[in-house]
Image: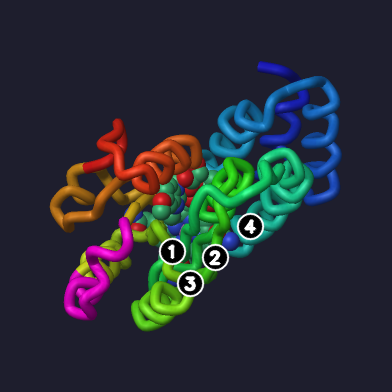
Amino acid sequence: MEKVLIELQQAIENGETQIAMDKTKEAMNHGIRTDKIIQTAINPAFKDLGQKMFDGEIYVTDVLMASRAAHAAMYVMEPILSRSIGTSKGIVAIGTVAGDLHDIGKNLVIMMLQGSGYTVIDLGIDVPVETFIEAIRMHKPHVLALSSLLTTTLPELDNMIDVLTAEGLRSQVKVIVGGTPVTAEYAGRIKADAYANDLFEATEAVEDLVKNRIGKYTV
Ligand code: B1M
């Protein structure tokens, strides 16, 4: 692996914001693609941090510092990931479900969707079901994208689909779910329309949902 990517991973893990930005710029100047930067530096950094957090080797504050550094790296890549391609291909409303504050993955999914030509309404983190419903009524998105990183907030995905049905909105919006504890099997069980494992799959799945196609990630 390129030295610069190892250094970027290290800088993120150490919460070194300026170094993370510099290393991201350096990697891009070397012609390393943003998808490679994400897959070989950002994702492994958080895999490592997650394990250390689980083992009690580091504290939440350490992970917060690392998150800040990762956001800074993403900020450097943003103009490339979100390069607009003219008219909107569709509207996606996205948020992290109630009780969950994780947003690094969601923000990457947003950048990728924007870069692929979608209008994205970001509802943020810890989003209650009522806010999602309000956004659907107001913006009429083609797709509702729900992110959950915690096992404890998984039932919020199920709950969201039940409320959509109860409110008579289920046929008006396609639902895609994602985040580490989510699986294709779970997505099928709660009758979501698609499941995606990462930002690339999420974009492909949204493309299928907007075009009403059965695709690799529709369930
Ligand atoms: Co949290 N946390 N965290 N954390 N954290 C995890 C998720 C955990 C697995 C760590 C661990 O114990 N090993 C664990 C969850 C265990 C579980 O429930 N199964 C955990 C825990 C327990 C907690 C707290 C409870 C810790 C505590 O307080 N004791 C607490 C909960 C707070 C809350 O939400 N209420 C907490 C807090 C935090 C921080 C605030 C410190 C910070 C979040 C900062 C932020 O997001 N702004 C944090 C972080 C950073 C992590 C880890 C280390 C990294 C997550 C991350 O950003 N990954 C994480 C461990 C891990 O995942 N290895 C962990 C990088 C990111 C690019 O990947 O988010 O997976 P990811 O997103 C991917 C895919 O999942 C997918 O695409 C993204 C890009 O490829 N994807 C979608 C995501 N959403 C999608 C939506 C889609 C499609 C794809 O369509 C809609």
Which quarter of the rendered picture does the C terminus lie within? top left
Is there a contact, CB below 8 Å, between mark 2 and mark 3? yes
Which quarter of the rendered picture does the N terminus lie within? top right
**Amino acid type, label 3:** His
Is there a contact, CB below 8 Å, between mark 1 and mark 2? yes
Is there a contact, CB below 8 Å, between mark 2 and mark 4? no
Q: Label 1, secondary structure: give it.
A: loop
Q: Return the mark for residue 121.
A: 2
Is there a contact, CB below 8 Å, between mark 3 and mark 1? yes
Q: Mark 1 or 2, which is nearer the eye? A: 1
Distance between mark 3 and mark 4 Cα atoms:
37 Å
Distance between mark 4 and mark 1 Cα atoms:
37 Å
The residue carrying mark 4 is 62
What is the x, y in percent for residue 84? 69, 45
**Amino acid type, label 1:** Pro
Q: Label 2, secondary structure: give it.
A: strand
Precedes in sequence: disc 1 or disc 2: 2
Q: Is residue 100 above or below residue 42?
A: below
Q: Is residue 17 left or right of residue 61?
A: right
Q: Which residues are magenta?
A: 162-174
Q: Mark 3 or 4, which is nearer the eye? A: 3
Is there a contact, CB below 8 Å, between mark 4 and mark 1? no
Q: Ligand 1: does it lie within 8 Å of the C-beta at label 2?
A: no
The residue carrying mark 3 is 139
Precedes in sequence: disc 2 or disc 4: 4
Crowding at mark 1 (Cα within 10 Å: few <14, some 14-19, many 20+): many
What is the x, y in percent for residue 43? 55, 38
The quarter of the picture where residue 21 lies is top right
Q: How many marks?
A: 4
Q: Label 4, secondary structure: give it.
A: helix
